[in-house]
Image: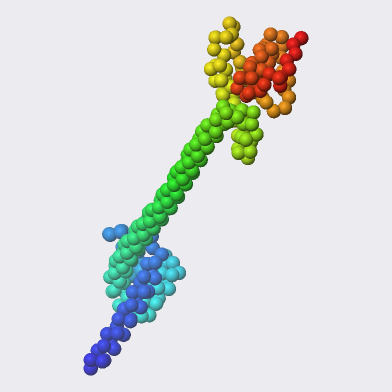
Amino acid sequence: MAFQDCWVAAMFKKSLLKIEALVDQLIAGWPESWFLPNNFLVIEHVLYIQSEMINAEGLSTDELSAVQALINAMGVDEFRNQIPNLIHQAQIRYVLSAEAREIEVAKERERAQELKRQQERENQKVRNEAERVQREKIATERAARQEQDRLRELQAEAMRQDALLLYENSYLEADAILERKYGQLDVGAELSQIKIDFLRNWFEEHRGDQSESEVELDDEQLHAIGSVDGHIQLVARAGSGKTATVVFRTFFLLSHCGVGTNEMLLLAF
């Protein structure tokens, strides 16, 4: 008996689900406004279906198909009696389904926004890491440049002290020694300036008050005075200091470089 009751209940549930599906088909094409409470148009339409049934000319093909299937399943009298209530229940299901869809859409939207925010956080992490790496790179490069500059300054100062010591004690051999020690470093301009500075300081210390008229020696004159390798030629206008340069060169070679008077010949014309 229990089995029979269960079977009857199952068949009834199956039949009910079929009827609900047919009613859902019936209202599937209705406008959204018809699902609002107490809508006059839908009430009028339901009364029209209830009275005319399959003879209703104002129904769509899908509506007529659903009405015919419902009449076949329920019978004419049951259909006429139950159709308003069935449609009302279908409307409730539709509204609940719509609300469920809206909730699901809202959830999906929130999930999408959260994914977007998460992606933005990940992107920001990547940007922050890239910026950190770039800052570290810049800092490392800056530190390397500063270290190179410091080493160059130390090297330049050591070279300067070395050159000044050689110019002071072994002037005639100084250029050859410095070339061997520093020639590969491309510091010719620096060494030339060190020599000019040395010569300028030397003349300031050794001329004293012997000259009634002070002569200011420029870099070109000092370069000519201090050149001891090979020949030099002075080309300049009259009164520009050529004779003074020759005199000071002679004075420097005698006084500082230890060149003897018997090793020099001066001609003036």
Q: Is residue 185 left or right of residue 144?
A: right
Nearer to the camera, 183 or 249: 249
Relative vertical location of residue 35 with respect to residue 52 in this rendering, above or below = above
- Classify residue 17 by image quadrant: bottom left
- For the point 59% across and 6% down, which residue is it? 213
- Relative to residue 30, is residue 184 drawn left or right? right
User: What is the number of callouts on the image?
Assistant: 0
90 relative to 7, above or below: above
Q: Residue 25's x, y, as percent?
A: 39, 70
Q: Residue at x 61, y 17 (%)?
A: 218
Q: Does the rendering let one see residue 61? A: yes
Q: Position of residue 93 (x, y in %)?
A: 31, 68
Depth check: 222 or 43 in front?
222
Q: Is residue 69 left or right of residue 152?
A: left
In which quadrant is the C terminus drawn?
top right
Quick one: 126 or 120, which is closer to the camera? 126
The correct choice, above or below, for 190 with respect to 70 in the image is above
The quadrant where residue 189 appears: top right
Quadrant where the N terminus lies? bottom left
How far across and how far down the image is residue 173, in percent?
Answer: 64, 31
Judged from this view, the residue extending furthest toward the bottom is 1
Q: Residue furthest top?
A: 212
Residue 241, quarter of the rendered image = top right
Q: State the residue at coordinates (58%, 31%).
A: 166
Q: Please give the name of the residue rendered at 69% of the width and 28% of the height, measured from the top-left corner.
A: 229
Residue 207 in percent (x, y) is at 57, 14
